[in-house]
Amino acid sequence: MTTSSLCAVQILSCYKVGGAQVMMPRRMAFATPDMKAAIFAIADDVKARGGAFVLSDLFRSHDMQLQAHLDHVNGKKPAFSPLPGGSMHEGGRAFDVVIDDLKMSLADFWEIAKRHGVVPIIAEPKTTIKECWHFECRGSHQRVYDHYASGKGRNMKPATAMAASAILAVGLKVDAFNDCDAAAVQAALIRLGYDIGNIDGAIGPRSRAAIEALGATGDMVQIRLHLTAELQRRFPGEYFEQTLEATAPGGSFESLPAATSPVTEAIIIAAPPPASAPAPAPPRTAPPAVKNKPLEASRSIWGAVLAALAGVGLALHEIATGAWSWLEATLPFSTTWLFLGVLLLATFLVIYARIDDRLKGRR
């Protein structure tokens, strides 16, 4: 099921690569409606102060986040990047800004960002601190962070839980959950003010009580749609473009009807989910080397032999395990004592045989 509220935003500013100005790739130019509004509002404010609002990062797909994490682990990327499912970039709710192009102090930029609902993730406005360039538009997902920070949720760190909530909210998968619909329902309940404990994809008594209190019925997909409609009613800026065409008569979000589908028919115009964005052209590679056919054939034979041996080994292991289990279940005493008894008897017989041999040799 897709409950995407991501809007395609082709960012008008650029980022620098080797001194050249390059447009941000479209696969990275996705953001939620409130993040999109904040980006353009911040850009206007920065421009008015004589600076340029230049982004180096915005949306990341699952694979992009995984690569960023591996680059950090391998030392290619000094700044920390969590595994997929743990970054607000994956929910279209985080950007990295080029600090030097702002032409103002980081503290001044913090004030501009704050006015538009965007917050940093470091404690002090110092450019010497890693991730000083990372900012987030948290919206109602801040409630998930606060829920975990207060100890009401314990299976994840607050920032990870908030990121998971943001990712699930736009209809994308989080690897940590076997049932993403159930996890999305739990995150939605927390955003709606209910204390349901952990987000884990397993609906418990507190979650069911909250669902009933909201009047949601049906299977988990239907319940998720019901809660999404309630979230759209309470936090319209997170789901609807803040333009005259997207608002109800009079320009007020308060009178928007509750949504009956993930994106509502004529109220929201959402782009296809990021997975459908055009992929970058594959890198050119050298033509494959000519294979040595006899060598390849030899490797294939040995591979088959090794595979067969491995199969025999596994079969013998299964037989031995089964026999041992049968002994444990059948014999009236512990197989451990049986083993020790047999070992002692064998030892006694060996010692007796050697003593007997020595005595015979003396005769």
Image: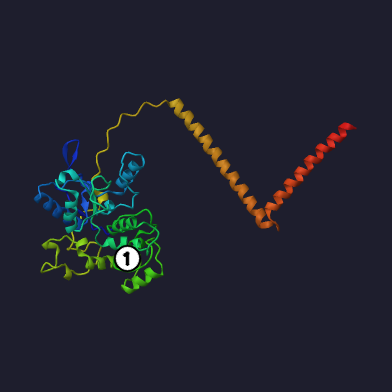
Q: In the rendered view, tell whether residue 8 sits above or below residue 314.
A: below
Image quarter where the N terminus lies is bottom left
Residue 213: x and y in percent read 33, 74
Q: Is residue 293 left or right of residue 107?
A: right
Q: How is the image coloured?
A: rainbow
Question: In this orientation, which residue lies closer to the viewer: 97 or 322?
Answer: 97
Residue type at numbered disc 1 = Ile
Q: What residue occupies the far right of the structure in this picture?
A: 363
Residue 33 seen in the figure: no
Q: Residues within 10 Å of mark 1 (few under 14, many from 20)?
A: many
Residue 318: x and y in percent read 59, 47
Q: Is residue 357 left or right of residue 74?
A: right
Name the residue tied to disc 1. 190
Name the image quarter holding residue 193.
Answer: bottom left
Q: Is residue 129 left or right of residue 345?
A: left
Residue at 62% x, 51% y: name it: 322
Numbered circles on residues, count? 1
Residue at 9% x, 51% y: name it: 48
Residue at 60% x, 44% y: name it: 316
Image quarter where the C terminus lies is top right
Q: Is residue 288 left or right of residue 335?
A: left
Residue 250: x and y in percent read 10, 69
Residue 319 seen in the figure: yes
Name the image quarter holding residue 22.
Answer: top left
Q: In the rendered view, tell whether residue 310 sits above or below residue 157.
A: above
